[in-house]
Amino acid sequence: MELDFSSSRPIYSQIIHEFSKAVARGELAPGDRIPSQRELAEQAKVNPNTVQRAYREMEQMQLTETLRGQGTFITKDPDLLHKLRSELANQAVRAFLDEMSSLGLKAEDVARIVNENLTSEVTHNG
Amino acid sequence: MELDFSSSRPIYSQIIHEFSKAVARGELAPGDRIPSQRELAEQAKVNPNTVQRAYREMEQMQLTETLRGQGTFITKDPDLLHKLRSELANQAVRAFLDEMSSLGLKAEDVARIVNENLTSEVTHNG
Amino acid sequence: MELDFSSSRPIYSQIIHEFSKAVARGELAPGDRIPSQRELAEQAKVNPNTVQRAYREMEQMQLTETLRGQGTFITKDPDLLHKLRSELANQAVRAFLDEMSSLGLKAEDVARIVNENLTSEVTHNG
Amino acid sequence: MELDFSSSRPIYSQIIHEFSKAVARGELAPGDRIPSQRELAEQAKVNPNTVQRAYREMEQMQLTETLRGQGTFITKDPDLLHKLRSELANQAVRAFLDEMSSLGLKAEDVARIVNENLTSEVTHNG
DNA sequence: GTGGTCTAGACCACT
DNA sequence: GTGGTCTAGACCACC
């Protein structure tokens, strides 16, 4: 896992976000075991306590569950992937459109700008 | 000016963002006078020091300039509106498309989702 | 035996509590044989070491005794049922009344609340 | 605030419980400021990080809200007291009656035991 | 081995 | 002053 240590977004929050996206992408499936806190801490070069805070909050969000002494697992909810993906996508869309509208851009401007960028961006990365 | 006190985004940064958007929208034009620090602090119910920091950073960004004894004014740059608007819009688009691509969504999915939301959202607000 | 794997109460402690309650209820009588550690581990889907710890502590509490090669048995104490029942009941009552009193509820409130719930709860389950 | 360092219940959880009860009792009212993390840490002789964890979870529970740089406050919900009191009382009653019923006690036994203890306990403490 | 709690202490951002 | 994040390292309970 790659973290941005220069970002203002807290590391534990980046970790949560990375796992959320991995589940939304389908890379992590319900029931999958995720790395132990110590493993991830070592691999990502952060303190185990930072990883633990992320894992604790993921459990409170019901994204994961922990089995005593066995590790941490993605919650066994068959619909988790779609729920997460649409939730995260909706958040992103709403924030984006709010921002664009507060810049005084009209629907047709937004559509144009998105389409211009879609060709280069998404097909490039995905 | 409305601020979100429960957001993790600092108040001073929200103030800067609000002024930037107002200029990008054309509501504030180059040369316009903005409220005094005391006025804004009172109206928005924030600490005067917080307003001071926002104004200081806006001046460093060259978004505003201060005339001694007369107040603070939007910088007299005829192209400021377009520069700001495209800068803020580009930031928003890049962040949005990065997020969508990291959710595993393809260009056509993104285009569809944006268009679905554009009809209801932007035309509604703008 | 049903255990709550998401509880913060340790599994071994839940096992002990389940046997204690069964004896207090009279379902297990002094001299009764309880399942072997292997059997219980398999049935309840827990680690054999966990069952072992529960059985070890039950023996220290003198709730059970082990006869070599024959298995584990509830201690042959004719008064065990009443001792256990009143001990567990007293613990429960004290914890409950402490909590109610720390919520600022008066004796009459507590009596009323208990009576309200007694009609639906206990007669329903017992 | 008095904490039981020998209890198996984590300190941060005891802190949360203490504040919850104080609100349910009406000792802390919505809008009241609670001690700063450092203050409480010093007074209760625990590490500031332990207090912070309790405060963070209370905020997630919406029991409190924090105002940047100003401190932590009980949530301004006029009905908070009654909601909390009935929620905590219901939890306690249910746990208690479940336990009593699993000991094989009937409604009349429970009523008798509670009434016996009510005279000495609650009137004594409250 | 696993996760959970706690301490100590540093550093930062905000008001 | 306030709360928020992070590190380092200890200790514990559980499996």
Image: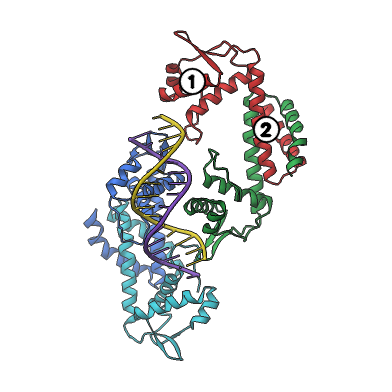
Chain colours: A green, B red, C cyan, D blue, E yellow, F purple
Q: Quadrant of the C terminus of chain A?
A: top right
Residue type of the residue flagged with mark 2: Val
Q: Residues within 10 Å of mark 1 (few under 14, many from 20)?
A: many
| Mark 1 belongs to chain | B
Image-quadrant location for residue C76: bottom left
Question: Tag 2, which secondary structure?
Answer: helix
Q: Determine whether A78 is above or below A108 in the image.
A: below
Which residue is under mark 1?
B55
Q: Position of residue B124 (x, y in %)?
A: 67, 27
| Proximity of marks 1 and 2: CB atoms separated by less than 8 Å | no
Q: Position of residue D104 (x, y in %)?
A: 40, 73
Q: Is residue D27 among the parts visible in the rendering?
A: no
Q: Position of residue C117 (x, y in %)?
A: 40, 60
Q: Residue furthest bottom?
A: C69
Q: Is residue B113 left or right of residue C31?
A: right
Q: Residue at x 43, y 45 (%)?
A: D56
